[in-house]
Amino acid sequence: MAHLFNRNVLLGVSGGIAAYKSAELVRQLQERGARVRVVMTRGAQEFITPLTLQALSGQPVHTELLDAEAEMGMGHIELARWADLLLLAPATADLLARLVVGRADDLLTTVALATPAPVLIAPAMNQQMWQDPATTANVQTLVERGYHMVGPAAGEQACGDVGPGRMEEPAVIAAAAGALFESGLLAGKRVVITAGPTREALDPVRYLSNNSSGKMGYALARAAAEAGAVTTLVSGPVDLEHPAHVTVVDVESAQDMLDACLAHTAGCDIFIACAAVADYRPKAMADDKIKKDADTLSIELVKNPDILATVAAADNPPFTVGFAAETSNVLDYARGKLERKGLDMIIANDVSNRDIGFNSDQNAVTILTPRGELPLAQAGKDTIARQIIEHIAAALESTA
Ligand code: CTP
């Protein structure tokens, strides 16, 4: 099922009898993981109340272009930028015509002009109106401009006519919205990703660890699944929801993580090591809780296996990607790791900058391969993850 996890969908409802189906559409979009906001035309409000859609979306419904109060909340330009997708459902014949001529005389058409996001249109109208040459020409113009269409369906209409023009069912529209984001770049590929910290037990109740949030690895797993890959996430202990359509293998220690990775990377196409693996573990775990009898306590540590280097050194290894979190000489250290560990790609980031990396929702990285380097500007981890996945897919293609 094509999902909309972490996608902002702006649902534009115009005035047709199918507007009552928008309520179900909001739910269907949310079930696929989307955050939904609703814009309604004046006509739409004759068929369904803003309150209904507000209650379902959990957000105020936007109706007015020239409303000082609404503009103070989320103005029309902000709404247009917020959207990852503008979904017009139902889209009346009048709305299609207004889009064609670029009108901006209400909030919905203004947002449609102002958004850089893709637009998906679910037309709904009487069959005669749908088949009118004016509508046919308008639809053709919109398709040529890159707008996406879903439906209309054919059948019995509210007015008693039979023919094409009925709005597609909400489930079909939500699926079409999801499919727009499924790149298929990694269709049929198997991807294994490590994420989060590891915990190295000292005694039954204590451990050594670090404060990796796992957010970047989870974003990569979502992006890989979205690109059509069969995705396995080997995750240390984190406080994050399991991503949809991803198999999650929960582990604790570096040794557990290595075992899980070796079990899952055999025959896989891509391995991405994003976990902050503890470099050392206590030489022995105490069977009982350590008592504070002594004034000082020394713990002997031994080095943990390097999971990334182990997978990279396997017979017939997958395309192997590492991460290098550095505080100085970022690119030099990262290139050193790329070569030393025999990787195909390494993602370097500067963790001395508190705004990005560990625990932040933002990141800014440089992708290094044996052939060159490419900086990616600071963005949300989901955006960075999608870009990384695109570059991995391109690199894989060029080595095929
Ligand atoms: N990694 C791993 N297994 C380990 C240690 C690291 O798989 N035992 C992976 C990480 O997931 C990351 C990369 O290796 O992809 C980080 O490389 P590493 O050299 O371990 O980084 P640091 O621990 O920061 O090393 P250094 O102290 O040498 O900078």
Image (cartoon, grey):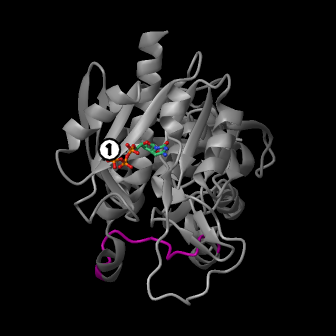
Whether 317 is drawn above or below 253: the answer is above
Residue 2: x and y in percent read 66, 41
Q: Residues within 10 Å of mark 1 (few under 14, many from 20)?
A: few
Judge from the rendering whether residue 58 lies leftward or rightward of residue 99; answer left or right: right
Residue 214 in view here: no
Residue 400 in view here: yes
Q: Nearer the viewer, residue 128 or 306?
A: 306
Q: Which residue is mark 1?
A: 102
Residue 242: x and y in percent read 65, 57
Which residue is drawn at the image coordinates 28% and 38% (left, top)? 334
Whether 48 is drawn above or below 344: the answer is below
User: Quadrant location of residue 154?
Assistant: top right
Residue 167: x and y in percent read 69, 45
Whether 72 is drawn above or below 114: the answer is below
Which residue is drawn at the image coordinates 27% and 32% (left, top)? 335
Which residue is drawn at the image coordinates 61% and 53% (left, top)? 235
Whether 97 is drawn above or below 280: the answer is above
Which SS type dominates the magenta stretch? Answer: loop
Q: Nearer the viewer, residue 159 or 147?
A: 147
Which residue is drawn at the image coordinates 49% and 9% (left, top)? 400
Residue 107: x and y in percent read 38, 62
Q: Nearer the viewer, residue 73 or 308?
A: 308
- Furthest residue in direction front, as rendered: 294
Q: Nearer the viewer, residue 125 or 173?
A: 173
User: Quadrant location of residue 238?
Assistant: bottom right
Let me know if residue 58 is in the magenta part: yes
Kind of residue indicated by mark 1:
Gly
- Indicate the quadrant of ligand 1 in the picture: top left
Specify start and end residues of the magenta stretch as a single range: 56-68
